[in-house]
Amino acid sequence: MSTLLRGRYPTTLTIGPSTLDGRDIVLIEIESNRDALPGLGDKTHARIALQEVQRFCDKTVIYRIVSMLINEPAAKSLEYSETGPPASAICTVHDGDTLLQIQYMENFHDAFRFSDIEVQKSGMFFGADGGVIQWWEELEQPRR
């Protein structure tokens, strides 16, 4: 069974440099409020800390997820860890666009495309029952 998520719902995405336990990281925070989905609920609040592992060239970098919280209370803090699942991300710049692929766990990933005019986000979640949920989003800039 496959579910394709359609519709308009608020999502915020924040990405920027930070530190975690004295180490340089890229901090990503995603908040989405939508209709309920099997295995995912009606909202997602993800906080992810990425640490650079290898720079292939000036346009491509591999990251390792060193901390991740999904749908945990806001008061819970990210904690740096060198152990855990081999979750990773890769970021590359191509033809003026920045592409970021994050493999959160073996059954859950997101891909982002940042251009001068828009941000696109797509992903998949594979449920334990064999079902698949896919999404594709265009994130709009906040109106001022």
Image: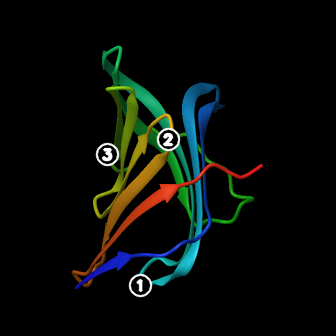
Check contact, mark 2 vs mark 1: CB within 8 A: no
Tell me the residue at 48%/46% (across/down).
119
Relative to 75, 57 lies left or right:
left
As shown in the figure, which amino acid type bears the numbered disc 2?
Answer: Ser
Q: Nearer the viewer, residue 111 or 90?
A: 111
**Residue 117, image x and y in percent?**
51, 40
SS type, badge 2: loop
Q: Position of residue 143 (x, y in %)?
A: 72, 52
Tell me how far mark 3 sits from mark 1, CA to CA.
25 Å
Residue 129 marker? none
The residue lying furthest to the top in this view is 58
Q: Which residue is mark 3?
A: 86
Q: Earlier in the sequence, mark 3 or mark 1?
A: 1
Task: Give the vertical position of 112 relative to 35 (above or below).
Answer: above
Residue located beneath label 2 in the image: 81
| Disc 1 residue type (three-letter) | Pro
What residue would you read off at disc 1? 38
Residue at figure coordinates x 58%, y 26% from the top left: 23
Q: Which of 90 and 21 lies nearest the eye of the viewer?
A: 90
Nearer the observer, 73 or 91: 91
Q: Is residue 46 above or below residue 64?
A: below
Residue at left offset 54%, top offset 33%: 26
**Are circles 2 and 3 on residues that touch, CB within 8 Å?**
no
Callout 1: few (<14), some (14-19), or many (20+) C-alpha neighbours within 10 Å?
few
The quadrant in which the N terminus is found is bottom left
Q: CA distance from mark 2 to mark 1?
A: 29 Å
Judging from the image, what secondary structure is the residue with disc 3 in?
loop
Q: Earlier in the sequence, mark 2 or mark 3?
A: 2
At horizontal 44% and vertical 61% (from top left) the residue drawn is 137
Q: Tag 1's secondary structure?
A: loop
Depicted 12 relative to depicted 129: above or below: above
